[in-house]
Amino acid sequence: MTNQSKISPAFEPFLAHSLPNSRKDAIVIYRGLVAPESMPQAGTAAYFDTLKKQEQSNQAISNKIINDYQNTTRQSFYAQPVGQGVLPVTKMEVTRQSLPILAEHPDVVAILPNQKIHLIEPKEIDYSGLQKQEEQDKTTWGLKRLEIPKVWETTQGQNVTVAVLDSGVYGDHPALQGRVKDFIVIDPLGRRITASPSFDSGQHGTHVCGTIAGGKTEEGLSIGVAPQANLIVAGVLVGEATLLTLIEGISWAVEKGAKIINMSLGLSYYESLFPQVFDILVNQYGILPVVAIGNENHGNTSSPGNAYNAFSVGAVEQIETDNLGITFFSSGASLVFPADSPNAWVTKPDVSAPGVQVYSCIPPVKMDNGVFQYTYMDGTSMATPHIAGIVALLMSAYPQAPLSKIIDVLKKTAYHPGGEEQRPDNRWGWGMVRPLEALNALK
């Protein structure tokens, strides 16, 4: 890796109109010391003991980088670790002149500008009454189509923690009773704020949580894929959220023992170095980042969902009778990076799941015709929590299964209308997941 390749191309417009010594915040990823195979099972005492050791070693490396950087530039730049140190990431000030100097440090892997992030907004919100078929089936159409009730005969997601990085959660919702185990707000400065009771700055995070691990509505309708999974929620989209906010939330999720991180958010540009963050999650901690691919239609993708190592999700809808199709707004593209072997060709999304007319819980909303605590939403943000819940089911049933195996069976058992020879493509990915087949493939 050359020094120039460590610097995100997004710095060019980020610093274009700044003076040579004007300071900007950067996210610096550096080389950690813990080998991937040394991490015990998440949630165990041994796991948290190893995290403590990881924090100490990372902080030592971070301090060395900061000291070397300031000594070389002969300037006092503000710097602080991100989180407790479980991720080898630090926030540092840079200028146009000092950025190349920082990149020369042998322990620095990547430097990213601290740009804004945004919620991947639902395409539609519908407060209409429950569809008759779902009312009869006592389950959402997505859960029925995915055959989730059959998977529940084996597991309902017990002992698996799913982190949701979103707009927050209304944890007092009856459908989420007992499921939200921890909640925090990350403010735009990257500070962790403990808040009780938990709250949602909108509706999105609560809706997502309901699809992952919600229980039943008052009418007995099941809305959640993994109703016994544990949820930890970070409100990272409260105020002017940035990349720092997101990575602080990711660090918090790792510290809390999450095995899956659900993200329905994006950057306004393609960040070529974000895969370095996911590489730490997947290869060091065995944590799966499940990310919405975006609602910008075919030919587009949203970063970081288009990172080669993100498990990105497209949206399926029911067409007329029982036919399925990828909905028009679901993003997807094939990305070509000739110099990035072995990831020179990246096809996104990876898989697909129900993402249209998804019924789930929301904070209470007063309207002229009553108070609503549930609604339908459309979006890849609604498809993504289906996948997060399914992964929780598989991890619960087979806790010793490697993450790579779970990813592999989800892809290879998925349904694609074009058959084996046409997948993966940039509409369906490998196809709509089939959880029951994936569960059987893990036996």
Image (cartoon, rainbow, N blue to C red):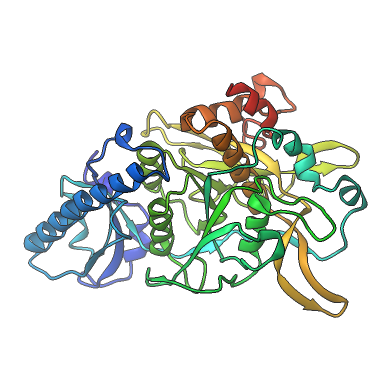
- Residue at 68%, 52% in the rendered image: 211
Residue lying at 20% horizontally and 71% vertically, measured from the top left: 21
Task: Work out which quarter of the rendered image holds the N terminus and state it.
Answer: top left
Give the total of numbered labels: 0
Question: Compared with residue 195, is residue 6 higher up or lower down, i.e. above or below?
Answer: above
Judged from this view, the residue extending furthest toward the top is 421
Front residue of 171 and 20: 171
Q: Is residue 65 above or below residue 5?
A: below
Q: Is residue 281 left or right of residue 135?
A: left
Q: Is residue 295 visible?
A: no
Provide residue 360's location: percent of width, then percent of height.
73, 57
Say if residue 76 shows up in the picture: yes
Q: Write down the quadrant of residue 319 in the picture.
A: top right
Residue 231: percent from left, percent from top: 55, 55
**Residue 283 higher or lower than 10, as above or below:** above
Residue plotted at (82% across, 42% down): 318
Q: Position of residue 334 (x, y in %)?
A: 55, 36
Q: Quadrant of the C terminus?
A: top right
Instruction: Single out the residue that lies furthest toward the front.
Output: 45
Residue 234: x %, y % from top left:
49, 62
Q: Nearer the viewer, residue 17 or 352?
A: 352
Residue at the spot 47% in from the left edge and 72% down from the top edge? 240
Instruction: Please tell me in which quadrant of the rendered image residue 146 appears.
Output: top right
